[in-house]
Amino acid sequence: GYTLKDLELSDTIIFIGANPVVAHPILWKRVRQNPDKKVIVIDPRKSETAMNADYWYPVKCRGDLYLLYTLANVLIEKGWIDQNYIEAHTEGYGEFKEFVKPFTLDQAQETAGLSPEQILELAQLIHEGKRVSFWWTMGVNQGYEAVRTAQAIINLALMTGNIGRPGTGANSITGQCNAMGSRSYSNTAVLYAGGDFTNPARRAKVAESLGVDESVLAEKPTATYNQIIEGINEGRIKGLWILCTNPRHSWTNNETFASAVKKLELFVVQDIYDTIESAEECTVFFPVVPGIKKEGTYINLERRLSAMRPCLAKKENEITDYEAILGVGKALGMGGLLKGWETPKDCFELMKKCSKGMPGDITGVTWEMLENSNGVQWPFREGEALEDDERRLYEDGNFFTPSRKAQFKFEAPMENPLPLTEEYPYLFNTGRGSVGQWHTQSRTSEVQFIGDVSAREAYLFMNPGTAAAYGLEENDRILVHSVNGEKAGFQVRISDQVREKELYAPIHYIECNKLTPSVYDPYSKEPSYKATPVWFEKMEGGNADVPDKN
Ligand SMILES: Nc1nc2c(c(=O)[nH]1)N[C@H]1C(S)=C(S)[C@@H](COP(=O)(O)OP(=O)(O)OC[C@H]3O[C@@H](n4cnc5c(=O)[nH]c(N)nc54)[C@H](O)[C@@H]3O)O[C@H]1N2
Ligand SMILES: Nc1nc2c(c(=O)[nH]1)N[C@H]1C(S)=C(S)[C@@H](COP(=O)(O)OP(=O)(O)OC[C@H]3O[C@@H](n4cnc5c(=O)[nH]c(N)nc54)[C@H](O)[C@@H]3O)O[C@H]1N2
Ligand SMILES: [Mo]
């Protein structure tokens, strides 16, 4: 519910599993603009953000939930909570208080990898802060108990009254420029602007907004990403159409994607490059134009709706993503169902209607308002005046629940589905490698100065102690064997950014997700991308040559 300005207003900024120095440099600029703040980083790795922080807590990988429950318990025992806020605006605190009692300081070293002193210090920092903000990204979201961990962060903000005020909040940082837009419009396909598939009132409302019969709306949540890939591998799904994603590279355990697509009868890839790895096995490739030739809207991490305007004209035979999708709909004979969807602007009008009365109500936003503007944050309802360009949610202490009170959500930590073992004693962590490289590099590898400063080959970071134990030197090659049954070669970069027993591989090389497992959070179905048990051996051939620059 934040606005990015909160980074400038917070006196205690806590990043959990987030490395904004590399992944969100523009957001990090807001942190730097804040003259009076403490920056705290919770990350097993000494990330670039940890290097620039006032405090770094090297939590055990996947130990966050224990850490957060222990912190809650300490805050309660010390009386460092906001009883008034809890009583006025939350429910379930009594049960939560009982639940966290076993999470004592003396078990935390074992479960969270931090000493009692470290946890007390962190609790004190939270207590002393007047405007404490919690920010998390993929170090939290990409795990087997990601949802509970995110909720545990929210619990801390609620119990200390650090929510809805300037410079506070439990704030999720999303990655893509339209990550929030795609989540709300919609990853739960057809229930645009949110809602529950089993809620007849909501279904009727969406059907009415779209001018369609309710029977064309899905009746239950549509298949998740992992269910689609599993469905193909089990022969239940015969056709797949992907756009704006390169899963042969980026999807977890990516060999399972490679084997799945071979079983498809129809595999459509729609991208701006036909050279991406995912296009190798496609039956049809739809070439489309990039963002600079398109129009539309997107919603960014602070709920801001912005417009995209073409700055280059399309050539005669070029088409946009929108036209490709609409064209297929027409060819399929969807006829009257496509009425009102002719252009991105028409689509925007429909989405506005769907949003009416929902948390993300945008009925007051017009297409024209988004031109030459800073965009508009939701909610912005019909008839409202845009008085403040930087608004946050929950300032009135009301939440989007039936009682309008926030709920404490918690559950006993799960057993790690893939713990380190004697056979697989190293933990393979993954994430962003450099400011210049974007994911699968389909685009950024085209930019010459990024190419010039980027490694050509897959590499990983290894602690000097581990390297010494294996007799490894900088740029030596190792073969990494994953618990998922696959193996891949990496060059070694020796660095004390990673600890003993841990390795860190940038995601920009296809080898990375060859090794990640098919393990998901039970609620979000997000892959557990950051904690794969592996072992490795030195590769013959020794020191890698400095790669050719063509
Ligand atoms: N240059 C560049 N910027 C990007 C992107 C890019 O590809 N390149 N991608 C964008 C996208 S889509 C996204 S989603 C964001 C991602 O942004 P971030 O999530 O900030 O980036 P990551 O590097 O994936 O992971 C963040 C940190 O999580 C840590 N981590 C791993 N395991 C744990 C754990 O168990 N606990 C904790 N507390 N931390 C852990 C990692 O060590 C890492 O430092 O970046 C966006 N920005
Ligand atoms: N191990 C590990 N794996 C990860 C992660 C991790 O931290 N660790 N992070 C995960 C995260 S958070 C993310 S977001 C994913 C990202 O994974 P992907 O989304 O698969 O990666 P991108 O390289 O961004 O792929 C975007 C594709 O869209 C294409 N494209 C660009 N513009 C357009 C357009 O206008 N139209 C069309 N049709 N195509 C276009 C690009 O050419 C590219 O092929 O990776 C995930 N994978
Ligand atoms: Mo992402």
Image (cartoon, grey):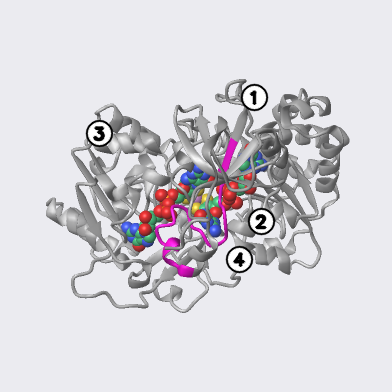
For label 3, the SS is: loop
For label 4, the SS is: helix
Q: Could you tell which of marks 1 and 2 lies nearer the N-terminus?
A: 2
Query: Mark 2 — residue?
Result: 395
| Residue 526 in view (yes/no) | no
- Find residue 26 and name its label: 4
Q: Could you tell which of marks 2 and 3 lies nearer the N-terminus?
A: 3
- Find residue 412 and name its label: 1
Q: Quadrant of the N terminus?
A: bottom right
Compared with 323, 527 (above or below) is: above
Q: Residue at x 81, y 41 (%)?
A: 81
Say whether marks 2 and 4 touch (CB < 8 Å). Answer: no
For label 2, the SS is: loop
Q: Residue at x 25, y 54 (%)?
A: 211
| Residue 104 in view (yes/no) | yes
Q: Which residues are magenta?
A: 428-448
Q: Residue at x 45, y 66 (%)?
A: 382
Residue 435 sits in quarter: bottom right
Classed neighbour count for the residue bearing mark 3: other residues with Cα under 10 Å, few (<14), some (14–19), many (≥20): some
Q: Residue at x 82, y 41 (%)?
A: 123
For label 1, the SS is: loop
The alpha-carbon separation of the residues under discs 3 and 4 comes to 41 Å
Q: Is mark 4 within 8 Å of ligand 1?
A: no
Q: Give the dominant element type of the magenta stretch: helix, strand or loop.
A: loop
Compared with 364, 268 (above or below) is: above
- Find residue 237 and name its label: 3
Left or right, 256 with reference to 395: left
Mark 2: amino acid:
Glu
